[in-house]
Structures are given as structure tokens and as C-alpha cells.
Amino acid sequence: MLKRLTLLWTVVRGDARQLWRALRHPAAPAWLKVSAALIVLYVLSPIDLIPEFIPVLGVMDDIVLVPLAIRFLLNRLESRD
């Protein structure tokens, strides 16, 4: 699990920092906070779309879906400004 989180962090480092700053802003919308919490729950959850015991695909779903979800949230946030 630690290896998975480390790999995921290297992929989403910049976007995750930007999302963290947006969440800490006093005017952050509630939908952003709920969505970010759901992303964290998905990463930490033992239930995945593709199980981890499948050698490459088990980690690839996290490496693809989480950055896409974070980027989607940031794009929605920027379009609201």
C-alpha cells in the first residue's frame, strides 16, 4: 500500500498541492470538499475497480483515475471563477 501511495504521489504532486490550497481557502465550495474526500477514500479503500492482485492493471487504475479526478475538480473550480 505504501508503494502504491508513493507512486501515486509522484504522479499527482503538483495538482494535489493545488487542490490542497483550494481546499484550505475560506471560500472553497462544499462540493469541492466532498469530492476531495471521496478521492481520498477511493485511494485508501481496499476496494478498487480493478483488484490489486492483477499485476499491472491493479495499480494502473489508481494511477489513471485519481489524477483525472483531481484534474477534473481543478478544471471545474477554475471555470467557476
Image (cartoon, rainbow, N blue to C red):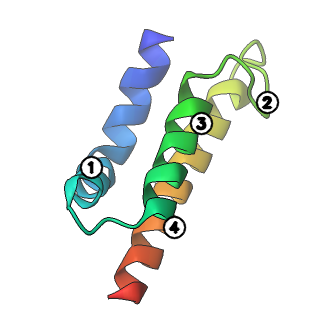
The residue that disc 3 covers is 62
Camera-side mark, 4 or 1? 1
| Label drawn at residue 72 | 4
Give the residue type at disc 3: Asp
Report how far apart the C-alphas of labels 4 and 1 lie in the structure: 14 Å
Under circle 4, the secondary element is helix
Residue drawn at x 46%, y 56% is: 70
Residue drawn at x 21%, y 62% is: 26
Residue 15 percent across, percent down from the top left: 32, 55
Under circle 1, the secondary element is helix
Q: Is residue 43 left or right of residue 54?
A: left
Give the residue type at disc 2: Ile
Asked if residue 49 can be seen in this view, the reply is yes
Q: Quick check: marks 4 and 1 in contact, CB under 8 Å?
A: no
Residue nearest the observer in this picture, 61 or 18: 18
Under circle 3, the secondary element is helix
Residue nearest the observer in this picture, 41 or 34: 34
Q: Earlier in the sequence, mark 3 or mark 4?
A: 3
Residue 22 percent across, percent down from the top left: 26, 61
* Label 1 packing within 10 angstroms: few (<14), some (14-19), many (20+): few
Residue drawn at x 25%, y 58% is: 18
* Label 4 packing within 10 angstroms: few (<14), some (14-19), many (20+): few
| Label drawn at residue 57 | none
Residue 69 percent across, percent down from the top left: 55, 56
Camera-side mark, 2 or 1? 1
The residue that disc 2 covers is 50
Q: Earlier in the sequence, mark 2 or mark 4?
A: 2
| Depicted 4 relative to depicted 25: above or below | above
Report how far apart the C-alphas of labels 2 and 4 lie in the structure: 21 Å
Under circle 2, the secondary element is loop
